[in-house]
Amino acid sequence: MSIFIEAAIRAVFVFGFLLVTVILLVWVERKFVSDLQNRVGPDRAGPWGILQTLADGMKSFFKESIRPTNVEVALFVAAPIIALMTALLIFMVVPIGAPVEINGTEYALVGADLNVGLLYVLALSSMAVYAIVFAGWASGSKYPLLGSVRASAQMISYEAAMGLSLVPVVLFAGSTSITTIVEQQQGTFLGVFPAWNIVLLPSFVIFLISGFAETNRAPFDLVEAEQEIVGGYHTEYSGFQFALFFLAEYIAVFNISALTAVLFLGGWSGPVFGPAWIAWVWPIGWFLLKTWAIVLFFVWVRASLPRMRYDHLMSFGWKKLIPVSLAWIILVAIAIGIRDFGLPWS
Amino acid sequence: MTDTPDTTAPVEDPAPIGPDASVAFSVEDERRKQHEIWVSGTEERMPFASATNEGAQELLPRDQDPALALQTGTAVEDDFISFVPAIDEERQIINMGPQHPSTHGVLRLQVELEGETVRRVKPIIGYLHTGMEKTAETLTYAQGSTNVTRMDYLSPFHNELAYSLTVEQLLGIDVPARADAIRILMTELNRVSSHLLSTATMGMDIGALSMMIYGWRERELCLDFFEKTTGLRMNHNYIRPGGVAAELPDGWEDDIVSIIEGVNAGVDEYEELLNENPIFLDRTIGVGVLTPEEVKQYGITGPVARASGIDWDLRKAMPYSGIEKYEFDVPTGLHGDVNDRYHLRIKEIRESLKIVHQVLESIPAGDYRNPDPKVTPPPRKRIDESMEALIHHFKLFTSGIEVPPGTAYQSVEGPRGEIGCYLVSKGGTKPWRMHWRAPSFAVVQSLPAMMSDSLIADLISALASTDPVLGDVDR
């Protein structure tokens, strides 16, 4: 009985955490881009415009959801729900802090500590493609169709690169459980450097690039390239259904940032100060700090780079990222083999 | 009984409805012959109507497309046709525009797509047509510059200048040296602001969002000065037949200096942001290429022509308003692609700023408009003192400037190419006919040559690089 209650509490917490985060995230992005672009940004709703996202969300909630006549109704309705579901579920396996002890029991600060955590993440991000493909195809319109064709090609190619970039991490940690991977990164290396997986630099870079592509963010936002195909897959969506896609996109950005922090930047690892009753806050703080730093990096890139062209995008993924990942996997495997078993001739 | 209609008689086929080019052509011809003047020197009428006839406003199957048939066999090498064998089921036709985020107004492009590849493009114009050339016939010469300034709304000063120079040519008058200098100052600043906007929107169209805001930031410096001088940010009606409307504002020298510094610094920033950016280079190099032959055959002028390597600038070739006194270079490109057009505009901004700087240093003192009382209204003070002045003032504002009969054509180098004004006067205070040579019009017609067999993304960047203003195309 108590295991169900615990799971429910965890699920509700993750859901609430993500929603609050997204509201902040949209505001932070708009403010940060405004700063980069010499503008003021939202400043009307609430102090510094912090309630702007809430206001926009309320507005879209009360708007009519227009459904064009020639849509495939079931898929058209299902697509935004799938998009949001997958985005929300990915975060379930991301640990946001070190385990805390309450009344003598140790609780992991994670939605669910799956021993196949990374595979779960990859599986769900593959599911996210379906949302976009369904949305584009079910809209019964040309621009969304173009968008979804682009999406299926782009996300499937970069899915491969992303999966390959995670193999060295798994080799290093010897586990696909994300909590184990974080724990393996605790402590220091040579006494000074934190023992983060960022030493797997090619993996880190490839993961980040594929992350941009997976979340359809600039410079890989061809799926919804406004100047080319109007709105891409969500051209025909309006009102709350559009808001669901919007929400899903920003949750996905946060997910990728959190995963990068957890897999490559040591997650919650960092110095801890103060008495025991405050010490448990520090790991959460470190995790959030790293995640938000990457979120800001996402925004910074969006403000600076032009959009890639479709054929360049595909050739970049297949001809550069994937071969480099494969070569890197072999290198890492050899290195680990030498570490564990010594040189072949010794 | 005999009144009963014979229901067995075969019903006559109604006359076929639909475009029949030959019939429409001959009817049109008859109607035109009734006019006293058609176009001077073309009694043997050139096939103007057919040359600009677009045919049906839809993409017809290849073998039925009259516009296509018309183009086949003309001198223009026809990129309109794709010789790649096609499976029709794999193609779809998409309408880009008239409402589309990056059609720069209300241009409509019918695009035949095969997957992501654009096979055919057909630009459809006219959504912004308001008959401004016809309107000009009902406006006096003094009111005319208010009309033309709204055509290419990004280069209002050039429009006013072309119109004023033509009217002055009909009148046979000159303007004082200071007026010429002010005209050059304003038009060159206008070129800067227009090119800044073009660079900004091109950046946005290829996805570099910040570029748009940066371009507008520097453009704002120019517009602030325009507003200070003329009272308006656009559509100024500042350059008028006989001179300019007002003296430059106090302290304009400082404003110009700060504009030159601000814009130069801004342009450095754009070059830092874009010039070496690999994604930008991928998106622009070899995209939207126009060969020099195509440029000539489509009649394209301005930056798009110069980017293809054609060294043709009216400021050098047919100088106006004393622009030959200033030192500046005319940059040209080598490849005629999007990247060349971007670089060319950046260079032209710098060259224009050079001219502005020279005007600042060499501007002569004197009157800013022609003192001829038949053209320029008298100063307010004189009206109280002189009966003559009162009469002139009254006549100028009730009937307008009297212009002798004749025809005149005068063109200036606008930011988008040759802006030409052709006026026919039969005497009186209103033009009998005005025709406007719009640079964007020629560029838009070349889009099929530029875009066929490219990708959708290239279509957008090619369109952005030609910088069309639909107000100018449709008029």
Image: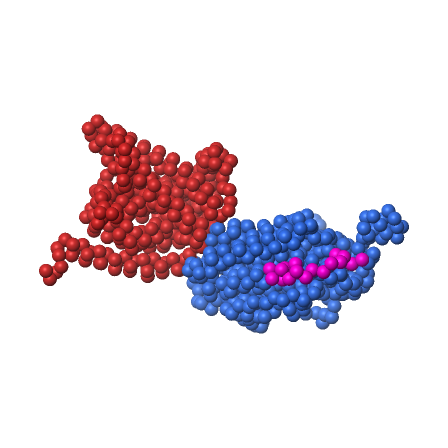
Colour red maps to chain: A
Is residue A78 among the parts visible in the rendering? Answer: no
Q: Which residue is drawn at 78% across and 63% down?
A: B173
Residue B372 falls left or right of residue A81: right
Q: Position of residue B382 (x, y in %)?
A: 84, 50
Front residue of A273/A260: it is A273
Q: In this view, does B344 lie above or below A45?
A: below
Residue A14 falls left or right of residue A148: left
Q: In which quarter of the image is residue A103?
A: top left
Q: Is residue B65 above or below residue B258?
A: below
Magenta residues span B353-371
Front residue of B108/A273: it is A273
Q: What colour scheme was applied to this rendering of the protein?
A: by chain
Q: Quadrant of residue A72?
A: top left
Q: How many tags in the picture?
A: 0
Q: Where is residue A41 in the image (x, y as percent from the top left)?
A: 49, 41
Q: Where is residue A308 in the image (x, y as percent from the top left)?
A: 42, 56
Q: Where is residue B147 in the image (x, y as percent from the top left)?
A: 70, 53
Is B359 within the magenta?
yes
Could you tell me which quadrant the C terminus of chain B lies in?
bottom right
Is residue A51 among the parts visible in the rendering? Answer: yes
Residue A181 falls left or right of residue A231: left
Q: Which residue is drawn at 33% across and 46% down?
A: A256
Chain B, which colour? blue
Q: Which residue is drawn at 44% across and 64% down?
A: B86
Q: In this view, does A7 lie above or below B100?
A: above
Q: Residue at x 39, y 60 (%)?
A: A312
Residue B474 falls left or right of residue A181: right
Is B59 within the magenta?
no
In the picture as drawn, the residue positioned furthest to the right comes out as B387
